[in-house]
């Protein structure tokens, strides 16, 4: 196992003054570099879907991308910031509704409206967090659920949103199949780039270091000068917008929105399952968990209640006996991180001369 | 991602994996389907999406059963009008009563399985999202089991190309309610219960909902606002009804909510002479759950064994269908049974009449030209009241003490459709 200096070069190796041993801080690994290339290829492949995939495949990939995005946002909240939320669907639904109102009621191009719609979760997340941050642990979780329920109740009482009857996105018919496919593919690529790539970038930055310290022990991190409340606030807002983007893209594909489908608590279950089974506090875990959920849903979804029981039992089993999830078990055995975020100190005395 | 792409490209499915597992043992029988396929002109794929599980599972209960019966009756093939015989595969999927799931499944079946006809059965939550997908991706879609206004107006009204629906309309159901109340001696004051959801808002609408014909018939209407589905406190509503001196309760609720409401009415000493509610009183289970309080509840009737039409597939009449269900399931018949059967009758009839059942456009033309008498009554899309809609007969019914089951549903009003005489007269509730 050899480490070389950071290839990205944003934080190049630091030669220390003579009093300290000469070390190099390294974050990138060979597996990380390979995974980075594969990730970029995957994003390009997503964007190029109209040229290699059928409409049906694009639709399925879109669903998978939404699972990955929502799970990664939940992972950032629960895995790093210590904010266990079961109400992220509040922001998914809010952005979904914003898209429908802008596109259907005001006639904005839906593919532009999707980005304007992100302002809604952004703006709503601020007062929500002001209320929620006073709550701790399980109380915070219940609080987020209450927020999502309040959103649902408000939406089902607003005549402007067509109340309980919901809205349809008829404007999609004005675009040809190819246009819709291109737009959906680009949106998928963007969603993955923003949620996975963005999280990776964030975790490798200064904030990431603080976040990892906070994940391990918030009190100790605070004593080292990490501004824990501010960091949590940033993560909460970012997760709200990330979930909003996923929600808007998902409801655009669904063509219909109504309060129970927009603010579906199922999303919280899906995110928890994906992150717990895949491996909490790791991007790799989200990708693995999302793939498992996606395939399980396709193959066993028709078994209804018993299928959910199996998913639930799996989650509980993993939470009790394999807390790191699948990726936790893998990374214990082989040190081949796809998205390495750990810093390694490499002692190289020969460099000193 | 890469694993998934590989999966999609190679077209692996759970079924093919399972099939692969059993391939060794079944090697000899595997040759059979190929041999059969050689004789047919192709395989017709029909998507059948039903709420088999979830809160609306009761509506989908008869769907899976009926598909099984129809499969047996057809023997896996269809003789089309163009002279060819086709293999028929019915892809049954569970929407889990969830509109998101219904849309996902419909998109998958239309785009990936490339089905030739989409058949969403029962409830607005399943039918509406499927219709949207079918319309956008241009797949013929025939449905039943939701008041037609609820699947047309939320989509903006207008004419549709690919989605046709047959069921009674809200207006007729509403007139049935008024017909039921006209049969009773009351103070002509009606209190109404509507949940805050798509059905409640459609039924409670002041322009085309239940209040309109009720007021027109000279009744005084009290609506204490919409309630949240699955609430456990109706005190506010009951207080409002008491204050208005209401004699009749009308509206739409789910069984759980009605049970809570009626129990609390009894506890709080509010005793209306009639409780006429849509949806909740469709199923014997909903009535039985109320115990002794279930006696005398009234509701709209979609279909009962008293309907006089015969099935175009099995030749059975309605009474025989109900008897077969009770015999197979050891449970009382339910009203969606008739529509489960009628929907498949229409779907099979479309495929039979289509000039090319493997072509969506041809199936769409056959669908628009439908003219058939199902166990629930005649179905044809004549343009009224809407291009994509055929309205079906509806009656008023009352649950009374039963013979072989706790409660029986009797037809007590035929003011909307005079197909046949009511079985008996409506009686006030005895508290």
Image (spheres, rainbow, N blue to C red):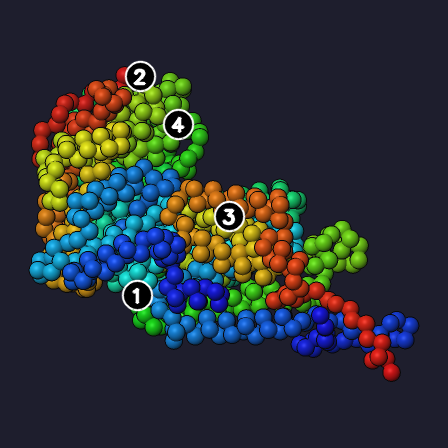
Check if mark 1 and mark 2 are on a common chain. Answer: no
Q: Which of pointers 2 and 3 indicates the residue nearer the eye?
A: 3
- Report the front residue among A63 and A161: A63
- Report the front residue among B32 and B203: B32
Nearer-N-terminus badge (1/3): 1
Q: Label 1 neighbourhood size at 10 Å, few (<14), some (14-19), many (20+)?
A: few
The residue singled out by tag 4 in the image is B260
Is B82 on the left or on the right of B251, as rendered? left
Query: CA gap, disc 4 to disc 1?
Result: 44 Å
Quadrant of the image for the C terminus of chain B?
top left
The residue singled out by tag 1 in the image is A173
The residue that appears at 32% across and 70% down in the rendered structure is: A177
- Report the front residue among A131 and B120: B120
Q: Label 4 neighbourhood size at 10 Å, few (<14), some (14-19), many (20+)?
A: some
Q: Label 2 neighbourhood size at 10 Å, few (<14), some (14-19), many (20+)?
A: some
Marked residue chain, label 2: B
The residue singled out by tag 2 in the image is B431
Q: Does residue A240 appear anywhere in the picture?
A: no
Outermost right residue: A19
Q: Secondary structure at mark 4?
A: helix
Marked residue chain, label 3: A
Q: Secondary structure at mark 3?
A: helix
Is A291 on the left or on the right of A251, as rendered? right
Marked residue chain, label 1: A
Query: CA gap, disc 2 to disc 3?
Result: 44 Å
């Amino acid at each position: 196992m050899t480490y070389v200096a950071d290839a990205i070069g944003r934080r190049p190796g630091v030669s220390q003054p003579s009093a300290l041993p000469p070390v190099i801080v390294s974050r990138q690994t060979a597996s990380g570099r390979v995974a980075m290339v594969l990730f970029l290829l995957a994003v390009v492949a997503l964007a190029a879907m109209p040229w290699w995939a059928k409409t049906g495949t694009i639709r399925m990939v879109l669903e998978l991308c939404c699972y990955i995005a929502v799970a990664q946002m939940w992972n950032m909240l629960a895995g790093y910031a210590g904010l266990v939320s079961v109400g992220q669907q509040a922001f998914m639904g809010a952005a979904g509704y914003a898209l429908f109102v802008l596109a259907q009621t005001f006639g904005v191009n839906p593919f532009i409206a999707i980005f304007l719609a992100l302002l809604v979760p952004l703006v709503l997340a601020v007062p929500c967090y002001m209320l929620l941050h006073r709550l701790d642990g399980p109380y915070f979780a219940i609080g987020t659920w209450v927020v999502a329920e309040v959103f649902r109740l408000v939406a089902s009482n607003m005549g402007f949103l067509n109340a309980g009857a919901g809205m349809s996105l008829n404007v999609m018919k004005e675009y040809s199949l190819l246009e819709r496919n291109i737009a959906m593919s680009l949106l998928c690529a963007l969603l993955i780039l923003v949620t996975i790539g963005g999280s990776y970038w964030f975790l490798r930055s200064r904030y990431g270091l603080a976040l990892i310290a906070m994940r391990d022990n918030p009190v100790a991190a605070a004593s080292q000068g990490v501004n824990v409340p501010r960091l949590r606030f940033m993560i909460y807002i970012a997760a709200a917008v990330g979930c909003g983007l996923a929600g808007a893209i998902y409801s655009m594909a669904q063509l219909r929105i109504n309060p129970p489908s927009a603010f579906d608590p199922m999303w919280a279950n899906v995110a928890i399952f994906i992150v717990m089974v895949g491996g909490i506090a790791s991007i790799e875990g989200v990708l693995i968990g999302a793939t498992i959920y996606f395939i399980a849903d396709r193959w066993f979804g028709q078994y209804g209640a018993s299928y959910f029981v199996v998913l639930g039992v799996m989650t509980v089993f993993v939470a009790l006996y394999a807390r790191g999830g699948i990726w936790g078990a893998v990374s214990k055995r082989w040190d081949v991180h796809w998205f390495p975020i750990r810093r390694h100190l490499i002692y190289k005395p020969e460099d000193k001369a | 991602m890469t694993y998934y792409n590989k999966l999609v490209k190679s077209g692996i499915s759970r079924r093919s994996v399972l099939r692969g597992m059993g391939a060794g043992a079944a090697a000899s029988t595997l040759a059979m389907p190929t041999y059969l396929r050689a004789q047919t002109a192709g395989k017709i794929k029909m998507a059948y999406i039903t709420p088999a599980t979830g809160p609306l599972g009761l509506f989908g209960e008869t769907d899976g059963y009926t598909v099984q019966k129809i499969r047996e009756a057809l023997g896996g093939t269809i003789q089309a009008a163009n002279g060819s015989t086709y293999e028929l595969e019915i892809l049954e999927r569970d929407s889990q009563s969830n509109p998101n799931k219904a849309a996902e499944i419909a998109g998958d079946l239309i785009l990936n399985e490339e089905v030739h006809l989409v058949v969403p059965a029962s409830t607005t939550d399943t039918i509406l999202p499927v219709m949207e997908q079918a319309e956008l991706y241009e797949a013929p879609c025939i449905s039943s089991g939701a008041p037609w206004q609820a699947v047309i107006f939320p989509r903006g009204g207008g004419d549709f190309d690919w989605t046709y629906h047959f069921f009674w309309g809200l207006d007729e159901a509403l007139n049935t309610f008024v017909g039921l109340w006209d049969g009773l001696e009351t103070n002509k004051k009606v209190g109404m219960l509507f949940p805050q959801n798509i059905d409640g808002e459609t039924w409670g609408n002041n322009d085309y909902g239940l209040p309109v014909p009720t007021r027109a018939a000279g009744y005084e209407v009290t609506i204490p606002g919409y309630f949240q589905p699955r609430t456990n406190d109706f005190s506010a509503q009951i207080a409002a009804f008491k204050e208005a001196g209401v004699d009749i309760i009308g509206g739409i609720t789910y069984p759980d909510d009605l049970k809570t409401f009626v129990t609390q009415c009894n506890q709080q000493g509010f005793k209306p002479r009639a409780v006429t509610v849509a949806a909740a009183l469709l199923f014997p289970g909903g009535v039985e759950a109320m115990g002794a309080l279930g006696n005398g509840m009234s509701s709209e009737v979609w279909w009962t064994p008293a309907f006089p039409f015969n099935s175009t597939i099995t030749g059975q009449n309605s009474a025989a269908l109900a008897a077969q269900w009770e015999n197979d399931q050891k449970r009382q018949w339910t009203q969606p049974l008739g529509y489960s059967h009628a929907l498949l009758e229409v779907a099979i009839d479309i495929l039979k009449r289509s000039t090319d059942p493997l072509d969506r456009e041809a199936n769409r033309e056959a669908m628009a030209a439908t003219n058939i008498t199902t166990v629930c009554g005649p179905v044809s899309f004549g343009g009224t009241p809407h291009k994509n809609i055929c309205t079906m007969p509806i009656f008023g019914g009352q649950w009374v003490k039963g013979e072989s089951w706790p409660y029986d549903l009797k037809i007590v009003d035929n003011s909307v459709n005079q197909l046949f005489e009511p079985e008996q007269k409506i009686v006030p509730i005895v508290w």
